Amino acid sequence: KLEGLKTIAVTTNGINLTRLLPRLKEAGLNAINISLDTLVPAKFEFIVRRKGTNLSSKATVLILGGMLCLLYLQVNCVVMRGFNDDEVLDFVDFTKDLPLDVRFIEYMPFDGKYCCFEILLGQK
C-alpha cells in the first residue's frame, strides 16, 4: 500500500472480473466502476464484441461479488439515442435497492474524425 492512497479502483465491463476479483481485492482494490450500457444481452454482446457473455448472470455476479467483498460500486451507463435510451428506467429499477451508485453519462459525439450527433441524447 502507498501512503496517502485511499482508493484503488478499476473500470471494467466485467468480462473477466469474476475470475480476477479475488486477486484484485487482495492487491488492495476497494472500488469498481462497472461499465454497463445495456441490460439487453444481445446489445451487451454487440458492445463488448463477444458472444456468450451471459449478461444477466454477469451483472448479478458483479454486483453481488462487489457487495460481498465490501467494495464501493458504481455503474456507468452511456446513454445513446436509438440504442439504449429506452432502458434508463430499467437501470433505475434494477439498481434502486442495491448499495451502489448509477451514473448516466451523455454520449460524446466524436469518433476521432467526425461528429456523431445522430445518437446524441442531449438537448437539440
Image (cartoon, rainbow, N blue to C red):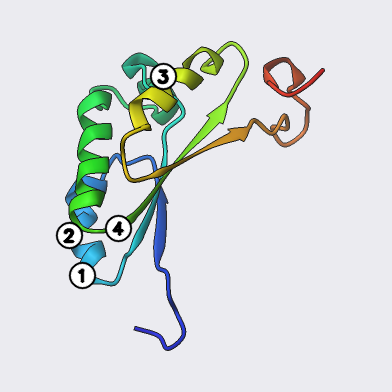
Q: Do the residues labelled 3 and 1 touch (CB within 8 Å)?
A: no
Residue type of the residue flagged with mark 3: Asp
What label does residue 26 carry, if any? 1
Q: How crowded is mark 4: few (under 14 residues within 10 Å), some or many (20 or more)?
A: some
Q: Name the residue under label 4.
A: 71
Q: What element carries label 4?
A: loop
Give the mark nearest the N terminus, 2 or 4: 2
Q: Is residue 106 left or right of residue 77?
A: right
Disc 1 to disc 2: CB gap under 8 Å: yes
User: Looking at the image, can residue 7 be seen?
Assistant: yes
Mark 1 and mark 2: span between their CA atoms?
6 Å
| Residue located beneath label 3 in the image | 90
- Where disc 3 sits, the SS reads helix
Nearer to us: label 3 or label 2: 3
**71, above or below 36, in the image:** below
- Can you name the residue that lies furthest to the bottom here? 3
Q: Which amino acid does label 1 sit on?
A: Glu
Residue drawn at 73 percent across, 24 percent down: 122
Task: Residue at 32%, 27% (x, y): give it.
Answer: 50
| Residue type at the position of mark 2 | Pro
Q: Residues within 10 Å of mark 1 (few under 14, many from 20)?
A: few
Image point 30% across, 58% down: which residue? Answer: 71
The quarter of the picture where the N terminus appears is bottom left
Residue drawn at (73%, 23%) of the image = 116
**Alpha carbons under labels 3 and 1: distance apart:** 33 Å
**Left or right, 41 with reference to 85:** left
User: Label 2 to label 4, Cα distance in Å?
Assistant: 12 Å
Q: SS for tag 1? A: helix
Confirm or deny contact between disc 3 and disc 4 (CB under 8 A): no
Image coordinates for residue 94, horizontal then vertical, percent:
34, 26
Q: In this view, does 64 lie above or below 57?
A: below
Q: In which quarter of the image is residue 42?
A: top left
